[in-house]
Image (tube, rainbow, N blue to C red):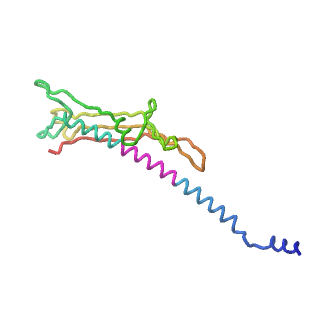
Amino acid sequence: MEVKRVRQVLRSNKGSGFPLAVAVTLCLVMVFSGISEYFRLMIIAQGVRDALQDAVISTVSDNYDDVYHGVREGYSGGYQPIASDFEESIDYGDIYERLDRILGLEQDREEHVKQDSGGNTQFKVWDLEMDIRNAPLARSDTAGQRFEVDSTIMLEVPVSFAGKLLPAMRIKVKNSAGYTPKF
């Protein structure tokens, strides 16, 4: 009698969809894990770009006090009057210090690192480059030029997928800011 029952169970198709359901569920979990890791990377990159922009804008604003207002000529630049002439005056500020404060970074040699509560690295930034372009003083052929700062910084974010650590995402984050007087 037991042999008959075993044969019935083996010939029955009940539960044959279970392995397929498990396989489909695992595939969906892997796809959603990949999508969520992608969004995590994009959110970190966007946050670093926004923090860099905030730090650069602060530096541009710090140069406000040295900007010569050429209202009639329609230009502005970082200059200070010295005797009967003007001398270029640019404040480079401390972008790294502002980034550290905004993002909660800690300096580790040449890199600035963000770590989670477990001591794992969330991301690193390094190699800040700034190009400050001062508007020319009293030139009629350069109308519309302004005091501008272009900056780039390298960002590295560790990538993990399905419990394995993959090569880190490294990108160059670019930013630009400028100062144009309103009046």
Q: Quadrant of the C terminus?
A: top left
Corner quadrant of residue 89: top left
Residue 65: x %, y % from top left: 19, 35
Q: Observer-nearest residue: 14 or 183?
A: 14
Residue 60: x %, y % from top left: 26, 38
Would residue 166 be counted in the magenta stretch? no
Residue 61: x %, y % from top left: 24, 39
Vertical position of residue 81 compared to residue 14: above or below? above
Q: Quadrant of the N terminus?
A: bottom right
Vertical position of residue 110 compared to residue 36: above or below? above
Corner quadrant of residue 98: top left
From the image, give the main secondary structure of the stretch colored magenta: helix
Magenta residues (range) = 36-51
Corner quadrant of residue 66: top left
Looking at the image, which residue is at 15% across and 33% down? 138
Vertical position of residue 12 compared to residue 139: above or below? below
Locate residue 160 relative to residue 138 in the image: left or right.
right
Would residue 43 be counted in the magenta stretch? yes
Count how many numbered circles sit on residues in the image: 0
Locate residue 166 relative to residue 42 in the image: left or right.
right
Looking at the image, which residue is at 32% across and 40% down? 55
